[in-house]
Image: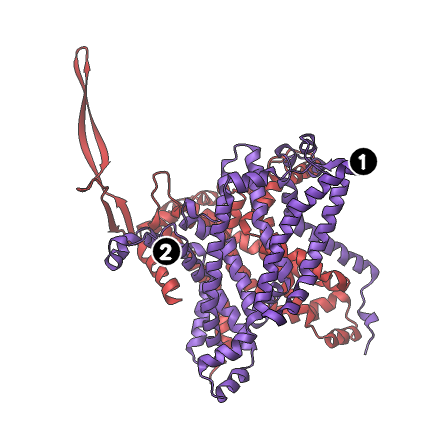
Chain colours: A red, B purple
Amino acid sequence: MLIFIAAPLLLVLINSFYVTASKFETVETESCTPGIAGEICVTELRTRPLLDEDDKVIRQTRYVGLQSYRNVLELEKAAGFLINNDFRSILTIDFWKALRFTLTFTFITLPIMLAAGLGIALAVNMVSERFRGQIIFVSLLPLIITPVIGALSIRWLFIGDGILTAALEMILERDIAMFAQAWTVEVLILFYRVWHIVPFAFVVLYAGLQTLNRDTLESAIIDGASRWERVRYVVVPYLMPLIVFLTVIHLMDSYRVFEEIVGLGAESHVISLQWITYDYLRPDDAGNRAISRASASAMLTMVGIVFILALPLRQTWRDYHPRRK
Amino acid sequence: MLGPAALRPSAALKTLAFGSVALWCLIAAFPIFWITVMSLKHPVDAFASNPLIVIFGDRTRETGLGISTFGLAVTAAALFSAYRIGRGALPRCASALSRAVGTRVAWILLSAAYILITPIVAIVAIPALAGSLDPLLGIFGRPIVGLTADHYVSVWVEGEFYRNFINSMTVTSGVVLISLTFGTLAGFGLARTRAKIAFWILIAALVFRALPHSVLVTGYLPVFINSAEILRPLFGEGAPTLYGKPLPVIMVLVAINQPFTIWMLRSFFANIPRELDEAARVDGCTYFQAFRYVIIPVMWPGVITTGLFSFLVGYNDYLVTSLLLDEQNQTMVPAITGYFNRETTSTDQVRAVAAAVSITAPLFFLVMVFQRHIVRGLTTGAVKG
């Protein structure tokens, strides 16, 4: 684990301080074309890559310090917007745009997932036992389907005049293009993630419900608790450890949101932190990969995950090390 | 002691519960069901805005391709029995057969047979049967739903999707094998040791599990691209370029998957009583003999479950494979982007749908056969983690 995970991380850190680029030289060239009144000569400055003896482009790696981080964060530009109280413009910078989306995404899907998961678990618990196997079977499908494919299948339902867009148009009686503006795309991404993750919450909470002690419930009834009060004061506190567990897993996973953006083809409207790194790593038209900038944004992403994990980790620490006196 | 009557919900609540469960099942299954329907239609039908046209495939039927009422009934019956066999009879057969040839062999044999036979029945036997009987059945033999397998043929045969399928299988099986080998050893060790470092390893695993995959890929990519130069002092002129080859990708995916595998197998091993292998040690087994003769026979449920999730990591991955593999070695999931990036014709789109359904089908069978294991895997991490 140390070699295969920690070593690459170290490499990313180092890479983020260096930039590899082709070496260029500027040369003055004079090109002459024969004309009627004599030769017409044009002198121009040209930039061309330096070649070594084998006619290969010389590539040079140099230390740039925090320059790559600055390129990713564009702090000066952001600060300029901040001074002018122009908060919207900050979101035109890729990194801040991605950060904004990743955080909203994480915190909107979390309560929906927990509520829907708990609701379905309670409902399934009431339905007769004969169908439970089938219900769980159907529920598992969205969970284990390939994320890109799942997002694609949602996209095909809505694209152009797909049947669900057509249905929405009929209900709202107006023309709808789901992929034309950012917020509808975002709604679709949220919808996909909820669809994908609710089964997990459902299965975990449902398994938890099976171990709930009936005596506790019965004593709650004797004490005159209504059905709602029983859920509120008996079931939810009992399931609390599972809810915490689901929250931690969900924070980790939704911070990595990426596949939805590829599947729904949303990159022109909405991007996430992981997508930025991916984009830097992809070869551009000239076949170059912005490794240094990718490393910088990867490191920044890492910092975020440390913040997110700090709380649960402290809890684990306390569990393993009861207070020493 | 109160009777169960006091716990029984009122009729209204029960209806509400039933309704919401039904609604959820509809939402959960609908997108998958719908792309399956779309993949079998003429492009004009598949992207029609009227759902009835999509289902009945008017245009597809006009081109003379379709299925009759009779064929529909046969297919429905076949699907139902395939489902029943997969969920009921297959596990029973496996446990019966396992007495003769061992659990693992029985499962592998039966799953392979099931996965091979079902598509053959669906693609070859049923159309042949319907084709020969339809003319004799009058109104029941007339096609009512347009269906065509053209898109599948063009994806798998002309588009050479089977290459991507083989690549996917190489990468996935590599990931499963390697992560299970190291995972069982590490998980067993961590479950049995009382050393303090075990705690730190587990914490590190948790942190690494949270790591965005792109961060790891950023670390690997430059090394892989330049690997020929880096490895030259070691291997001489024949030093390989690791970029684009399946083996390095397997390595990266194992690195991503390993923290999870270790956590999961640790909690499985922690459930196996310590006394079991201690008894074997008292009887004179060495440490490895105890593992071989006592632990290995009882660890299979945990290993199968973990293996399933490792399979999903390898099979479902997009980010790592799309960045690290070249065109020839591309797996199925990134290959599909080749179809929808073009967006030129709606035929291309329907082909992409067909490819997507092809990718989903194995997962469908996987849930059918291993539902119990998957549920156990999801809950083990939660309860014991």
Image quadrant occupied by the N terminus of chain B: bottom right
Chain of the residue under label 2: B
Q: Residue B138's mark?
A: 1
Position of B143 with respect to A239 (left or right) is right
Q: Is residue A315 above or below residue B275?
A: above
Q: Position of residue B238 (x, y in %)?
A: 27, 53
Residue B220 circle label: 2
In the figure, residue B56 lies in which quadrant? top right
- If you read the primary sequence from the N terminus, does the residue marked by circle 1 or circle 2 appear first? 1
Specify whether disc 1 shares its chain with disc 2: yes
Q: From this view, report whether residue A75 is shown above or below residue B45.
A: below
Q: Is residue B356 left or right of residue B281?
A: right
Image quadrant in which the C terminus of chain B is located: bottom right
Residue at the left extreme?
A38
Above or below, comparing residue A168 to residue B204 in the picture: above
Q: Nearer the viewer, residue A293 or B138?
A: B138
Classed neighbour count for the residue bearing mark 2: other residues with Cα under 10 Å, few (<14), some (14–19), many (≥20): many
Determine if residue A106 is in view.
yes
Task: Report the disc number at residue B319.
Answer: none
Q: Secondary structure at mark 2?
A: helix
Q: Nearer the viewer, mark 1 or mark 2?
A: 1
Q: Tell me residue B116's x, y (percent).
A: 60, 53
| Rendered residue at 76%/45% (across/down) | B73
Amino acid carrying label 2: it is Tyr
Residue A109: x and y, percent? 58, 54
